[in-house]
Amino acid sequence: MDTEHFDVNGSLLDQWQHHWDHQLRDRLEGLTDDEYFWSPVPGAWSVRPRGTSTAPVQGGSGDFTIDFGYPEPVPAPFTTIAWRLGHVIVGVLAMRNAAHFGAPAAAYDTWEYAGGADEALEQLRAQLRVWTAGVRDLGEAGLKVPVGDKEPYPHRPMADLVLHIHRELIHHLAEVCLLRDLYLHSHTTTNGATR
């Protein structure tokens, strides 16, 4: 390997893109609204029609809100696919896209959360497009620039933020896939076969 011409930016993008292309994208296709809102345990945090949540905090500006609590209860509540996608779309991607890549401002309180699986997946794909384009445009020099006061550790380089966001995406979207598997194996069709 020619380490003098090693493309760190390309490697960071490949890390995420490979995972998306070979492990996540196909696993998320066909997500149903039943799966999106399904809660395998009572009291799970989710995305809900406005005014129907009992969580201490309901964030969102549209017809649906996301459950939260400050401080977060201990133990933390279990979360549905809807909640996990909302967290990834807003907290992991949209807020970072706004802070670093010129995207519109985003926050848990002001986001219009998806009322169904198709809309949530489109929001996810849209935020991923902004993220990957932003990371690509950083180039080698941009990866070395400190993230600044928009992040908890302002002195850390953008490369560290990119690695962190990719870990968050891989982690939370793998959880979504696991919940889909659990849903599949715990719901039966009328003839007794699992669906």
Image: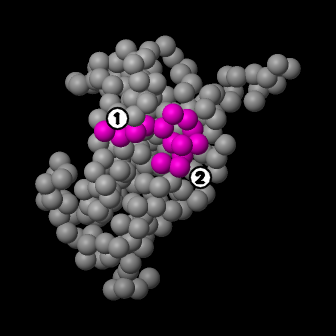
Quadrant in which the C terminus is drawn:
top right
Q: Residue furthest toward the right?
A: 191
Report the Cα–Cα distance between label 1 and label 2. 28 Å
Q: How is the image coloured?
A: one colour
Quadrant in which the N terminus is drawn:
bottom left
Q: What residue does disc 2 label?
A: 25
**Does residue 158 appear to the left or right of 45 in the view shown?**
left
- Amino acid type for the residue under numbered disc 2: Arg
Which of the two marks, 1 or 2, is nearer to us in this view?
1
- First in sequence: mark 1 or mark 2? 2
Q: Secondary structure at mark 1?
A: loop
Where residue 192 appears, x then y in whole percent? 82, 19
Q: Is residue 159 magenta?
A: no
Where residue 169 appears, x then y in whole percent? 43, 49
Taking the spot 35% from the left edge, 73% from the top edge, the residue there is: 137
Q: Secondary structure at mark 2?
A: helix
The segment highlighted magenta reads 110-123
10 Å neighbourhood of mark 1: few (<14), some, or many (≥20)? Answer: some
Taking the spot 31% from the left edge, 39% from the top edge, the residue there is: 110
Q: Are marks 1 and 2 in contact (CB under 8 Å)?
A: no
10 Å neighbourhood of mark 2: few (<14), some, or many (≥20)? Answer: some
Number of marks present in the image shown: 2
Q: Is residue 14 above or below residue 194?
A: below
Splitting the image into 4 quarters, where does residue 189 fall?
A: top right
- Amino acid type for the residue under numbered disc 1: Ser
Q: Is residue 114 magenta?
A: yes
Splitting the image into 4 quarters, where does residue 190 fall?
A: top right
Q: What residue does disc 1 label?
A: 61
Q: Relative to the observer, which residue lies in front, 118 or 19?
A: 118
